[in-house]
Amino acid sequence: MLDIAKDIHSLSDFKRNTSEFLDQMRSTGHPVVPTINGKAEIVVQDAVSYQRLLYRMDELEALEGIKRGRADVEAGRVTPLRKFEKEFRTKRGLPSRARRCREGGRKPHLRLGA
């Protein structure tokens, strides 16, 4: 979390004390906001904290997708798998998939000339 009192500094101060700011970011996990003419222009963050942020965003996006999927199921907005697969393959010009026998293997192919 950003601490306005400790994490917002002038760009000049950031340039003069870069190693101290890096130590601060590593120890707190907070980004630093260098300002130009008193306005926040950039955010600087250590790599570990940034990676953690990206990972968390991925988790949240996945959860949101799951919520949307569950809402679709509850609202009846679903397509049977066979219908979806047929439409998907047709739309992309893919051959239909060989069906499997009930015993688990592929259907035997008719051999011509044998």
Image (spheres, grey):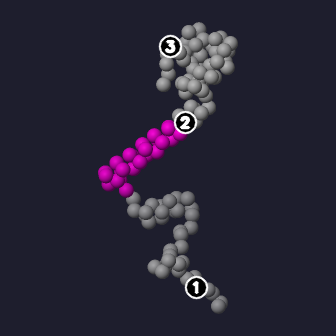
- Residue 67 colored magenta? yes
SS under mark 1: loop
Name the image quarter holding residue 112.
bottom right
Horizontally, is 86 left or right of 71 in the view?
right
Q: Nearer the viewer, residue 75 or 20?
A: 20
Neighbor class of circle 1 (other Cα within 10 Å; few <14, some 14-19, many 20+) is few
Q: Which residue is mark 3?
A: 5
Q: From this view, report whether residue 112 is shown above or below residue 43.
A: below
- Residue 66 drawn at (x, y percent): 41, 48
Q: Nearer the viewer, residue 65 or 47?
A: 47
- Residue 59 drawn at (x, y percent): 48, 42
State the residue lying farthest toward the top: 37
> Which is the main secondary structure of the residues drawn in magenta?
helix
Q: Which residue is mark 2?
A: 52
Q: Earlier in the sequence, mark 1 or mark 3?
A: 3
Q: From this view, report whether residue 91 is shown above or below residue 28.
A: below
Residue at 56% across / 67% down in the picture?
95
Q: Which residue is mark 1?
A: 110
Q: From this view, report whether residue 103 is shown above or below residue 26.
A: below
Which span of residues is magenta-colored?
54-78
SS under mark 3: helix
State the residue lying farthest toward the front: 27
Look at the image and tell me whether residue 95 can be seen: yes
Q: Earlier in the sequence, mark 2 or mark 1?
A: 2
Measured in 3D between alpha carbons, the distance from the residue under mark 2 to the one under mark 1, in whole angstroms, is 56 Å
Q: Amino acid at mark 2?
A: Arg
Residue at 48% across / 25% down in the picture?
1
Q: Amino acid at mark 1?
A: Leu
Measured in 3D between alpha carbons, the distance from the residue under mark 1 to the one under mark 3, in whole angstroms, is 78 Å
Q: From this view, report whether residue 106 is shown above or below residue 66.
A: below
- Residue 87 drawn at (x, y percent): 47, 61
